[in-house]
Amino acid sequence: MTKRRSRGDGGLHWDEKRQRWIATASLGYDPSGKRIVKRASGKTKTAAKAKLKEVLRDFEDGLAIAPTGYTVRDAVTDWLAYGLSGRDKSTVETNTTLCNTHVIPSLGARKLRDLSADDVDRWLADKTKVLSTRSLEAIRSCLNRAVKRAMARDKVKRNVVELCSVPAGRPGRPSKSLTLKQADAVLVAAEDSPLYAYVVVSLLTGGRTEEMRPLRWDHVDLDGDPTVTPEIPPHIAVWRSVRSSGDTKTRKSRRTLALPGRAVDALKVQRERQGWQRVAAGDQWQESGLVFTSAVGTELDAANVRREFRKVLAGAAQMPGVDLKPHEWTTRETRTSFVSILSDRGIPLEEISRLVGHSSTAVTEEVYRKQIRPVIQTGATAMDGIFGTPAPPER
């Protein structure tokens, strides 16, 4: 004889209208006295019971919403839609691309509650074949923040992504610096380019590309004041960037830089060229007050700057003894070149760090001084003084 089901155990029945098995369980009463009943459905009895077990497990874990079908794709999509509010447009685009390219195709179909640390480890290990370590850190960060947001909204009990470390990926594209000869060739090749002043100022002051593009004429002084003590040289005030806040990258990035004579001359040429552009554009000109603009006065786009910069490099590569492959270079490497050339001339690292607006000399040393590392001569000079320099051996 079949044992009678205890009161509250729920039941299992066939729904003719839905053509599915319905499993139910009674879990007591809410504060208003209404019975709490959880349901799940499936095409078979086994499927319905399995679904009900998931619903009950969510309830026991204290999850307010029973997300039995909530997937990694759902969590990532939700984070992209609502978790990046207030972020810069380029940041949103970058994260969206990373998620749509690397996260969702690989893990999107996985139910979030079933996602394990092993799943994440295998995913990251597989991505080491195609991504650099820095890119691996970026995609793990996307997934981590998406799951963390889902956990805060009772979609999952814990964040397994935080248990997983980032493996070493493929070597990234190394940052490069122009040699002194290459830099001189680039300055010459830029003379006929619309970016002439941009290239000169970037290379001779070490400004970031996101600091140069929004530079305004009211932050440029091409005369200085030689009548005061100490004398004020021609200078630019690096106080803005293309970031959503309009501020520079860090507090120390906000700085005022004296201009070399060649940069002063280039900016005078730029002011004259811009005047002719204003006349040529007529009613289409959009007054922005920017130093470096398009033909109609608007702010330069990063991609257009990079494309024009590579044309300049192509011109420099035609000069005798200059070996350059334009497609391998980006505009940010005028900054690394500035650091390396100064370093080669023996300028103290602390001073270079101040010029480029770094928060510490460690960043300057590890990230930017790529091309040239001066030979440390202190020890050899001291030993020559102590022991003398021996005469060359007879042959």
Image (cartoon, rainbow, N blue to C red):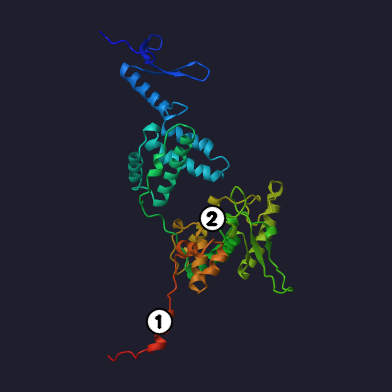
Of mark 1 and mark 2, the one earlier in the sequence is 2
Q: Is residue 149 above or below residue 287?
A: above
Number of numbered labels in the structure image: 2
Q: Which residue is mark 1?
A: 380
Residue 14: quarter of image: top left
Q: Which of the pair 235/1 is nearer the observer?
A: 1
Residue 57: give x, y in percent of width and height.
38, 27
Q: Residue shown at 33%/89% (left/top)? A: 392
Q: Amino acid at mark 2?
A: Glu
Looking at the rendered image, the quarter that the N terminus falls into is top left
Residue 180: give x, y in percent of width and height.
49, 70
Q: Is residue 123 above or below residue 171?
A: above
Could you tell whether 68 is left or right of 224 in the image?
left
Q: Which of the pair 294/60 is nearer the observer?
A: 60
Q: Is residue 32 above or below residue 220?
A: above
Q: Which residue is mark 2?
A: 308
Q: Amino acid at mark 1?
A: Ala
Residue 127: quarter of image: top left
